[in-house]
Each structure stands twice: as structure tokens, then as C-alpha cells.
Image (cartoon, rainbow, N blue to C red):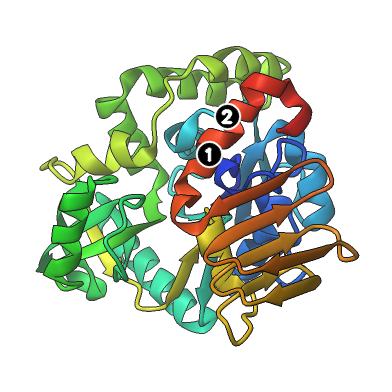
Amino acid sequence: MRYALIIAGGSGTRLWPMSRDTAPKQLLPFIGGKTLVEISTRRLEGLVPAAQRYLCAADKQEAMIRRVLPELGPEQYLGEPCGRDTLNAVGFSAALLARHDPEAVIAVFTADHIIEPVESFLKIVEAGYRIVEQQPDTLVTFGIAPTHAATGYGYLQLGNPAAGGAHTVKEFKEKPDAATALRYFQAGADHYLWNSGMFVWRASTLLDCIRRYCPENYAGIQKIAAAKGTPNYRSTLNTIYPTLPRISVDFAVMEPASRDPLVKVVAVPMPLQWLDVGAWTSFAQTCPQDQHQNALGAATTLLINSTGNLLVSSDPNHLIAAIGCKNLMVIHTPEATLICPADQAESVKAAQKTAAERFGGRYT
């Protein structure tokens, strides 16, 4: 049976100070008044029935997420006691679904993407399902044509054409350095695509890869899954999950799988409007702009001789005024205000960490 899984456990530190421990980015209603987790879930309507859509996120966020997604059934929220990166999130979820349905085919999505048009997106994911159903030893990823030499995304080196409009993946390169990313970008989308972070696989195939590549993670995940439905489940989860080695599914599975003769990795191109809302520079692309390329994520602004700025406020009554400013990001919240050149947006994560170290949890 087909399932959809949304991973919504990210902390969103690159969107600090608006994204906080108590209100992470996926729960902020800052995309046209909607949250990212709501947008990601509604986008799946028509793909699989609502009862076959699952969401993996932090235990502490369950009440907040259920307020946004009241349709989630009791077993459809897969809570993590702490974040241990994406390998453990998808592996833990796959193990639980495999106990329920050994033939489960799972499409994995993340809760921080804006994708248009939705109709085309659904058709492409449908093709991914069909590939895995026909070739159970296949891991499908979806590739996005690069628009610049990004170092924050993984890259898929495309090989020969495969069934279902896919291409074999010759190499999966996670987050290359600047020179390598530029080389990939200049080679063109016929040779390299960004890894979108969306996948389709059989639960059993993914779990077998984890068993062979990351046996310590596999052993822990299986102990947790075996306890599901017993009185010991919660204590087993809380004891074992925090000890699982922290690693992404990209490094742990996709890179070695692309070299493994026992499994096939294919990429399905996704020629759509795709935006990973992971930093303020990408969030700016979701905002209306004035005639001077200022992105306005604040209700009340005053700009004089200013161009290329991003102004964001969580308070609709708070005025942000900018005079003679160029290419700045100004992010206002009641607790903290960030002012940063747009070309230093990648430093926001480090700033959040420093604030946590210096002030404790007060501003994080």
C-alpha cells in the first residue's frame, strides 16, 4: 500500500529569531497566513488517502501540530523524543509502518517546501510510486534543476535514462564545496540536479540499506519498533532514540546506495517551481516586493532610498523604517531583532547558537 510521510522535525535555526524552540519554522503562519506544515500536508490531497498520511516530528510539538492538522489520527503522528537527524526520522517511521504493512511504499516529504504547480507535482510523485512498485529494490529521489551554484544542497549526478522518466544516479554528492558546486552548475541540468530531499522507497528496502550501512542505527530502530503496541513502547523510545548516531539519510543511505550493486538509485526530474524555505533569503522569495526590490514580510513599513532589503515583523502594528539601506535583512520579533546583510544569511544559524550559549533559552 502507498503511504506519505512528512518529516517536520527541523529546528529552523537559519530563520531565527522568528523560528524558535517554542515556535519552529514549520508552525509559523508566515506564508500567506499559513504554516509550512499545513501547506505541505494539503499539497498531498489526491495523492494518498488521508488515513495513509503520516507525520514525524518532535513529541513536544504534537499539540501545536494537531491544532493545525486536526485530521491526523492517533497513530499518524510519529513523535520523536529528540531530534537525531533525518536517517533516524525516516528509519524509525519506516520501521513502524513496516510492522503495520510489510509491503509499505512510502513517499517522503519535508515540511519546508513551496512547490507549484501542485497538479504537476502530484503526477511526478505518482511516477515515483510506480517505479518502486515495479522495482522494489529501487530508491527514488526527485531532482530539481539548479538555479545557482548552491553549497547547501546535495547534487545528483545523472547517468543513463531509466523507466518512468527517471535517470540512474551515478553519484550522490551531499553539500559540495563552492568550486565543486560551480562545476556542477556549469555542467547543466542534463548532468546534475539538486537533491530535493523528497524520496519514494519500500520500507523494507530502506530498512535493509540502514541495516547494511548503519547497523547501530538499525538495531536501535528495530528495538523501538518491536516495542510498539506494548506498555514499554514509550520508555523504550525515550531510552534508545536519543542514543542513535546522528546522521542524515543523504550521507547514511543515499551516498553509499548510489555505489551499491544490490540497490538502484534513480532520480526523477521535477521541473517545477521549488523553494526550500530554509533561510531568510529563500523566505524573501515568498514575500511581495515593491518597485525597489524590497521584500516586505512586515505589515507596516517605511522605506526611503532603500533597495533590495527584506523587512519582516511578527507584529502587524510595528513599523519598520529604513533609510538609505541596501541589501539588508531586518527581522523583528517582540523578544529579538536581527539585522544582517543579505549575503551573510548563512551566519544566522551561528548567531542563534551564540545567543543560546550567551543568554540560555531566553532568546532561542
Quarter of the image with the C terminus in it:
top right
Q: Position of residue 180 (x, y in %)?
A: 16, 51
* In-image side of 154 versus 323 (left or right): left
Marks 2,1: beta carbons within 8 A: yes
Q: Position of residue 268 (x, y in %)?
A: 29, 68
Type of residue at label 1? Lys
Q: Quadrant of residue 127?
A: bottom left
Q: Position of residue 13 (x, y in %)?
A: 58, 41
Q: Can residue 1 be seen? A: no
State the mark number for residue 172.
none
**230 or 208: which is nearer to us?**
208
Residue carrying label 2: 353
**130 or 160: which is nearer to us?**
160
Q: Residue furthest right?
A: 317
Q: What's the CA distance linking mark 2 and mark 1? A: 6 Å
Secondary structure state at the residue bearing disc 2: helix
Q: Residues within 10 Å of mark 2 (few under 14, many from 20)?
A: some
At horizontal 45% and vertical 82% (from top left) the residue drawn is 120
Residue carrying label 1: 349
Type of residue at label 2? Lys
* In-image side of 28 versus 148 (left or right): right
Q: Is 107 placed above or below 284 here?
A: above
At horizontal 60% and vertical 39% (from top left) the residue drawn is 11
Q: Position of residue 342 (x, y in %)?
A: 50, 58
